[in-house]
Image (spheres, helix red, strand yellow):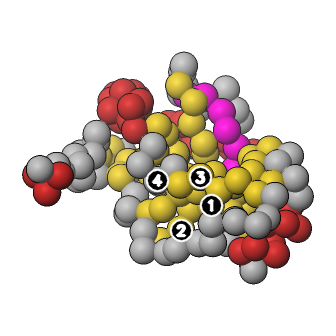
Amino acid sequence: MSDALIRNEPVPSAPFVAEGVTISLSAPQKRYSLRARTAQALETLLNVKVPKKIGETEGGIACLGPDEWLLRTDASAMIPTGAGFPIAITDISDRSICLVVEGPRAAELLMTGCPLDLDNFVVGRATRTIYETIEIIIIRDDEDRFHVEVWRSFAAWLWTAFTAAASH
C-alpha cells in the first residue's frame, strides 16, 4: 500500500518569473533541528565548524537561538544520531520546504509581508521571522538570493502570496 503513496509538493515545480524576481522550489534536501547547550558539543559530534552567534551561518548550518541550529544538507546525507551526547537531533525534512526568491527585486518582494529591513540583511545571515502571519526562516545566500524555509502546511499560501506580490 505504501508504494502507492507519492508526496506531491504543495507548490508548482516550475519557477514563477516576474519582472526582477524568480520564485522557485529548492532542490530536495534534508533538514535537521539541532539542540545543544553549546556549539562545541555539536562541533565535536558533527566534526564541522558550527556558527556560535545567533543569525550566523556556516557550511549549511544556521544558528537560530542560543541553543538551536538548523542544518540543511544534501538529500542523501546522513548525520550522526547524537547518541551519548547531550544533544537533540530531529529530522524535520518532511515538515518544511524551501522557496528560493532571487533577482534584483527579491528583498523588495520579501518585505511586502516581512517586518525586517532586508536591504540591510547581510549575506550569510539567517533568522526566524514572519511573512504576514506565518512563521518562516530567511537565509540570505547572496545579494539577490534568499532561501525561505516554510512549513509544508503553509507553503501553498506563501507561494500564492509571493506570486501575487511579485505580479504587482
Label 4 Cα neighbours within 10 Å, binned few <14 / some 14-19 / many ≥20: some
Q: From the image, state whether disc 2 or disc 3 is nearer to you.
A: 3
> What's under tag 4, amino acid-wise?
Ser
What secondary structure is found at the residue carrying circle 4? loop
Between disc 4 and disc 2, the foreground one is: 4
- From the viewer's perspective, is the residue at label 1 or at label 3 nearer? 3
Residue located at (80% from left, 72% from top): 43
Q: Is residue 98 above or below residue 72?
A: above
Badge 1 marks a residue whose secondary structure is strand
Q: Is residue 133 above or below residue 31?
A: above
Picture quadrant of residue 87: bottom right
Q: Quadrant location of the C terminus?
A: top left
Image coords of residue 137 (percent x, y): 60, 42
| Three-letter code, disc 2 | Thr
What is the CA distance from the residue labelled 4 to the residue labelled 2?
Answer: 10 Å
Q: Which residue is mark 4?
A: 93
In three-dimensional space, the C-alpha distance between marks 1 and 2, rounded to whole angstroms, equals 6 Å
Judging by the rendered image, the residue that carries numbered circle 3 is: 90
Q: At 87% from the left edge and 53% from the top edge, which residue is drawn?
A: 37
Image x and y of residue 73, in percent: 53, 68
Q: Are marks 2 and 3 in contact (CB under 8 Å)?
A: no
> Which three-letter amino acid code belongs to the residue tagged 3?
Thr
Which secondary structure lies at badge 2? strand
Dot 3, how many residues are within 10 Å of its Cα: few (below 14), some (14-19), or many (20+)? Answer: some
Q: Could you say which disc has been placed on residue 71 in the image? A: 1
SS for callout 3: strand
Q: Residue furthest top?
A: 133
Cα distance between the residues tagged 4 and 3: 9 Å
- In the image, is residue 130 part of the stretch drawn in magenta? yes
User: What residue did someone put label 2 on?
Assistant: 73
Say left or right for 55 vs 142. right
